[in-house]
Amino acid sequence: MTRTTLSAIRDRRLPPIPWTEGDNIPWQDPGFSQRMLVEHLSQAHDLASRRSSSIEAQVSCVAERLRGLDHASVLDLACGPGLYLHRLARQGHRGYGIGFSPAAIDYARRIVAQEQLDCRFEYADLRHADFGEGFDMVLLIYARSTSSNASTRAISCIGPTRRSSPAARCCSSRKHPRPSAAPRRQRRVGRQPSTASSRTRPTSCCTSAPGTRRHARPPNGGS
């Protein structure tokens, strides 16, 4: 350990001020974002974006909230590679996604160009981005903690004529699935742990705007 490191530890501020040292995850780094894109598209885990089956369930939940709206306008904050907006656009809705990963945004735009979807994606930091206004639905799914204030700001993005509508919603989801139970203690040496403890519980997909009342969970156990 160097003298500089020891000095930094000795002179550190207590209590610490959150995020004064910048971001702890380099989403904007091209190489890192390209590696993360592979994980976003992976069907082996839910650690970046969720797997397609879960996304389909959540999109069905969102589409149900948009029933009766023709060509609804949807804002997706921390949109990643656009996996939600692409699906909603295929159902006839319009999408605007904002994300901080260049590789993910590039991927989202490529799909839009290939399929001629009514979506647009912007590379921007949620903490400073202009969200716009007049949306029928706002999504905030798998967002990290530094963008937590985005959910409050998102409410103002819903059009004033839509706020009293059942479809006017800010839909959010926890960043990480929650384990259903703690792993059981293994009594026999060499015995493999049960896989049941790795199951995740579904989370609600919608909260009403501007309150925090939860709506029905997505079908098929989507999380």
Image (cartoon, helix red, strand yellow):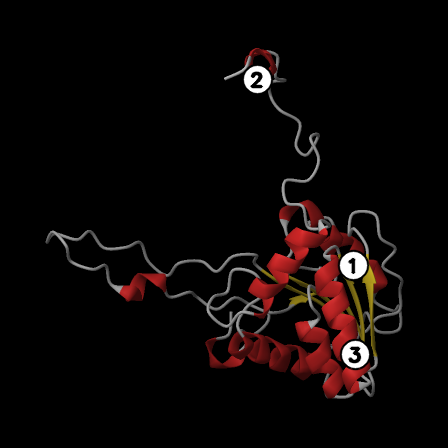
Quadrant location of residue 173?
A: bottom right
Q: Secondary structure at mark 1?
A: helix
Residue 172 x, y percent position in the rendering: 64, 63
Give the amino acid at mark 3. Val
Q: Which residue is mark 2?
A: 5
Q: Nearer the viewer, mark 2 or mark 1?
A: 2
Are the residues tagged 3 and 2 within 8 Å (C-beta)? no
Q: Earlier in the sequence, mark 3 or mark 1?
A: 3
Q: Earlier in the sequence, mark 3 or mark 2?
A: 2
Q: Secondary structure at mark 2?
A: helix
Q: Earlier in the sequence, mark 2 or mark 1?
A: 2
Q: Secondary structure at mark 3?
A: helix
Q: What residue is rendered at 79% in x and 54% in y? A: 153
Q: Which residue is mark 3?
A: 112
Residue 39 x, y percent position in the rendering: 56, 63
Residue 82 x, y percent position in the rendering: 71, 71
Residue 192 x, y percent position in the rendering: 20, 60
Give the amino acid at mark 2. Thr
Q: What residue is rendered at 52% in x and 81% in y? A: 219
Give the amino acid at mark 1. Ala
Q: Is residue 2 above or below residue 189?
A: above
Quadrant location of residue 16?
A: top right
Task: Bin the neighbour count of mark 3 within 10 Å (Cα to Cα): few under 14, some 14-19, many 20 and up.
Answer: some
Q: Which residue is mark 1?
A: 154
Q: CA distance from mark 2 to mark 1?
A: 41 Å
Asked whether, in this view, residue 159 is left or right of residue 105, the answer is right
Q: Is residue 96 above or below residue 111?
A: above
Residue 173 seen by the camera: yes
